[in-house]
Amino acid sequence: MKLTSNVCAAIALTLCSFGVFAEESHSELALKHAQVAAKATDAKTIAEHADTAKTHAKVADEHLDAGIKSLDEAIEHGNLGHTEEAKKSANEAVKHLKAVQ
């Protein structure tokens, strides 16, 4: 019974923390969860927050890679004189890079 209530409490805490972090970027969330893991005093909490941090770090990395790809496309289109395509690619880069912040 105690295990069930602990699991329910952990789930509730996780859901509440996602609501608090909803406006933050994936890199900020990764850092916050890594910091919580580093300060935790029990192995299970460390593992849970480290796993959440890793998930957010991977998403941030995917956005960074996509941002770089979009910048490469903007450069390529710009060098070819394709203004609209270059602008579209640059805007896509901005979206991805904002998600990383």
Image (cartoon, grey):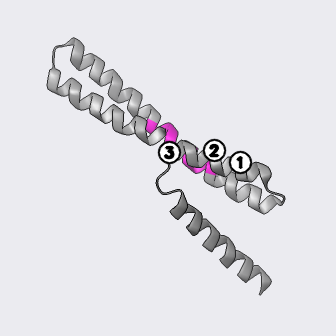
In the image: residue 46, left or right of residue 29: right
Is residue 58 shown above or below 73? below
Magenta residues, dominant SS class: helix
Q: Hey, what amino acid is under mark 3?
A: Val
Q: Hey, what amino acid is under mark 2?
A: Leu
Instruction: Find numbered disc 3 in the image and state the secondary structure of the residue it sits on.
Output: helix
Q: Looking at the image, which residue is at 74% across and 77% down?
A: 6
From the top left corner, tell me how far across and down residue 79 is, in percent: 23, 12
Is residue 69 shown above or below 14? above
The quadrant in which residue 70 appears is top left
Query: Is residue 61 located in the magenta-colored stretch of the structure?
Result: yes
The quadrant in which residue 10 appears is bottom right
Magenta region, residue range: 53-63
Q: Hey, what amino acid is under mark 1?
A: Gln
Distance from Cα at disc 2 to Cα at disc 1: 6 Å
Q: Which residue is mark 2?
A: 31
Q: Residue furthest bottom?
A: 1
